[in-house]
Each structure stands twice: as structure tokens, then as C-alpha cells.
Amino acid sequence: MQRTNYASGSKWEDIVGYSRAVKVGNIVEVTGTVASGPDGAVVGHDDAYAQTKFIYQKIAEVLQRAGADMKDVVRVRMFVTDISRWQEYGRAHSEFFKEIKPCNTMVEVSALIGPGYLVEIEATAIIAE
């Protein structure tokens, strides 16, 4: 099967060696994504809802580039620094997935890649053939 890597332009992709998303056949895996803006700054500082919504917009964009859509998402993994804020993360999640209802995991972690990040999200999409 053909493999296609999708970059976001982040300098870290080449330094660390990863892609924003990888498509193999009809499967698209989206790497852990934080609320980092084009300038590298945190978007939605101390706002779990805003960060989650921004991340899902970034995920939607890369899925579209890969020929997929949010409706193709079958699995979401959320890593959060404060699980007591689950309703804020969940509200943003619901705006994208209320009808789609992919599998979802939310795990509290002690830290993410940088200060200010409250949530990191991975997604798996399977494009219907």
C-alpha cells in the first residue's frame, strides 16, 4: 500500500522525525496535536475549551488534505493535564463529534510538550471505500 506523509511545517517535524499525519491505504493517523499557533505560541492559554477546539480544527485541516473528513474519525485519544476540566474538553469534542461518536479515550498526564498546553489529541480516521 502507498504511504503518504503530511507535514504541518513545524520545525519540530524534521528535528524529531515525525509527520502531522500519515496515510496508508484508507487509514489516516494524526499525530498528537497541541494548540500551537503558526508562530509556535500557545493558542487559548488556560482555556481548555479553546485549545481543544483549535486542535480539532487543525486535525480537520490535515484530514482534508489527506482526502478524509471528521466523519471518518473512528478513534480519538486525548491527553489532558487536568482531567477535572473534562467538561471543557468534552464541549469542544461534542461540537465536532456529537453525531459521529468515535471511540474516545481521555487520560490525565503530568505534563505536555511545553508550558501552557492543557490538551494533546491524536486521531485515527478510516476513509470509507
Image: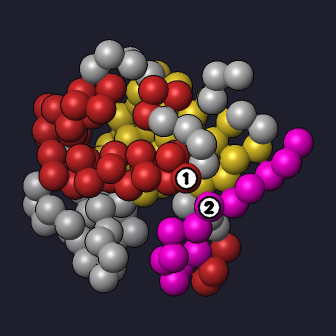
Residue picked out by circle 1? 65
Residue 120 visible? no
**Residue 83 image point, x, y percent:** 22, 39
Disc 1 crowd, CA 10 A, few/some/many (<14, 14-19, 20+): few
**Residue 1 as seen in the image, left or right of residue 111:** right
| Residue shown at the point (22%, 31%) measured from the top left | 95
Q: Tell me the magenta residue range.
A: 1-13
| Residue shown at the point (39%, 69%) measured from the top left | 113
| Front-most of residues 122 and 73 | 73
| Front-most of residues 114 and 11 | 11
Quadrant showing the N terminus: top right
Residue picked out by circle 2? 6
Look at the picture and state if 114 lies above or below 6.
Answer: below
Look at the picture and state if 91 lies above or below 28.
Answer: above
**Residue 96 image point, x, y percent:** 29, 32
Q: Tell me where residue 89 sits by quadrant.
A: top left
| Residue shown at the point (61%, 83%) measured from the top left | 15
